[in-house]
Amino acid sequence: FFSALHLSMDSRKEDVAYLVKQSIPQIVNMLIGDLLAKKPGNPVRFLQEALERMAMTENMKFGGGSGPGANLDCCTTNPNNYKVIAKTAGGRLVEMTLPAGQGDVAHDHPTHYLYVVNGGRLKLSPPPGHTEGSAEVDMPAGAA
């Protein structure tokens, strides 16, 4: 969807640059993908609620980076892969499920701790603290 918008705005490159810097293409693509996957009876309300969930995450302290997905909550950008299991005064417990070979939309995480239930190898593109490149990390079961 956004690529069509991008093409129609080609003459206004500064506008497109602003949207890309703010991660708007990723947000729009994620919202439309989720809307089409779930096909809710009231799509406007569905989108309003999704945007409200995004707004709630603005108070979380993310890494503050500038790369792809910077300051975008993993649970909002990838609702099929990340689910909030519990909320506590100190944060939240998030379950990540990612089948082998499947990727997800670029995102960020607030300060967090990790416990691996079922291990595997994870490819990070870009790796934390970088705006390009990739790194593969072994994630053995039981690692924390």
Image (tube, rainbow, N blue to C red):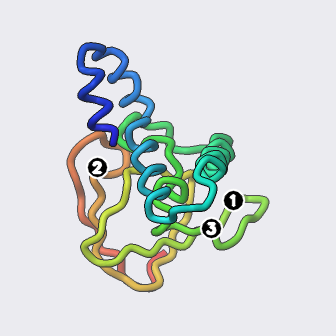
Checking the image for residue 79, the label placed there is none
Q: Which circle, 2 or 3, is nearer the viewer?
A: 3
What SS does tag 3 mark? strand
Closer to the camera, 49 or 101? 49
Q: Vertically, is 9 above or below 136?
A: above
Going from the N terminus, do you reach mark 2 or mark 3 first?
3
Which residue shows up at 32% across the image and 31% down it?
A: 5
Question: For the point 58% across and 52% down, which residue is it?
Answer: 43
Q: Which image quadrant for residue 16?
A: top left
Q: Secondary structure at mark 2?
A: loop
> Residue 84 shows which numbered tag?
3
**Contact between labelled residues 1 and 2, with CB atoms less than 8 Å apart:** no
Percent x, y for residue 65? 43, 37
Using a 10 Å C-alpha cutoff, classify the residue at mark 1 as few (fewer than 14 neighbours), some (14 to 19) or many (20 or more). Answer: few
In the displayed structure, would residue 75 be above or below residue 54? below
In front: mark 3 or mark 1? 3
Q: Tell me the residue that label 2 is attached to.
A: 126
Q: Is residue 60 visible?
A: no
Residue at image location 65% in from the left, 42% down from the top: 55
**Residue nearer the viewer, 54 or 7:** 7
* Mark 3: amino acid: Val
Mark 3 → mark 1, Cα distance in angstroms: 10 Å
Question: Please, what is the three-letter code of the amino acid marked with disc 2?
Answer: Pro
Which residue in the protein does label 1 denote? 91
User: Quick check: can you spot residue 46?
Assistant: yes
**Left or right for 6, reference 112:** left
Instruction: Name the amino acid, label 1.
Output: Gly
Compare marks 3 and 1 and give the one earlier in the sequence: 3
